Amino acid sequence: MKFLLVPLLIIGMFISFAAALLAILFINGSFDNIDELKALISPKVDSAQLSEELLMREDKLDSLFRQVEGYRVFYDERLKILREKEDSLNVERTRVLFKADSLQKRMGAKAAGEDSAIQELRDENLANLAKYYGAMKPAKAAEILRAEAGLSKEMVAGIISRLAPAKAGKIMGFMDPAYAASITEMMQNLQ
């Protein structure tokens, strides 16, 4: 029985407060008759129904949302294409750098080959000249090998260095001492 009294007490208090509120609203003049009160408590308009203006705004927001999603998909596709092109460019850049490096190595090897071929030809010419000057008499060879003959000191040093030491000494004995000293110095630099 006690359990039944508590809910009855709460319901009674609610009804008394509601009656007091209605009395105050009638005294204030908020309502003129009981029909206005009924219309406030239970309106005939469906409150779940949105107004036309709100429906238009909602449709516009839906349209904008779909448009944003379309742009996002477009952006993602473009970004994917751009990344693929960037990857392709990086691959091509690596390939070009590799080819340039390979070409540079080939050119370096070719230039080194040309330099070595030129050096071999020069060495061969100097060896042939050394044979000719080795076959001459030392006085005549010294006279031809002097600076006035048109041979450079480097060339003279290369020829004398390829001669037999005894023959080279005899030829240099017929040369001017200062000139022979400069040739000797160049021969040391050649080695």
Image (cartoon, rainbow, N blue to C red):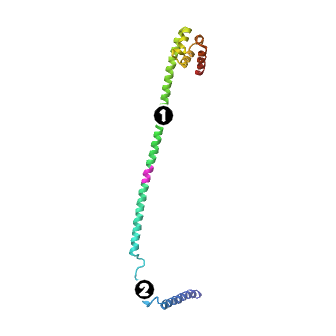
Determine crowd level at label 1: few under 14, some 14-19, many 20+ residues with C-alpha closer than 10 A: few
Circle nearer the viewer, 1 or 2: 1
- Please name the predominant secondary structure of the magenta segment in the image: helix
Q: Nearer the viewer, residue 136 or 182?
A: 182
Q: Nearer the viewer, residue 80 or 126?
A: 126
| Residue under pointer 1 | 104
Check the image and report above or below for 158 versus 30: above
Q: Residue at x 50, y 27 (%)?
A: 112
Q: Earlier in the sequence, mark 1 or mark 2?
A: 2
Q: Nearer the viewer, residue 191 or 79?
A: 191
Residue 181 location (% of width, % of height): 61, 16
Secondary structure at badge 2 equals: helix
| Residue under pointer 2 | 39
Secondary structure at badge 1 equals: helix
In this picture, residue 156 sits left or right of residue 93: right
Residue, far front: 148
Dots 1, 2 in contact, CB < 8 A: no
Q: Which residues are magenta?
A: 78-83
Q: Quadrant of residue 41?
A: bottom left
Q: Quadrant of residue 44?
A: bottom left
Q: Residue at x 42, y 62 (%)?
A: 68
Residue 162 location (% of width, % of height): 56, 15
Q: Which mark is residue 91?
A: none
Distance CA(mark 1)–CA(mark 2): 95 Å
Q: Quadrant of residue 139?
A: top right
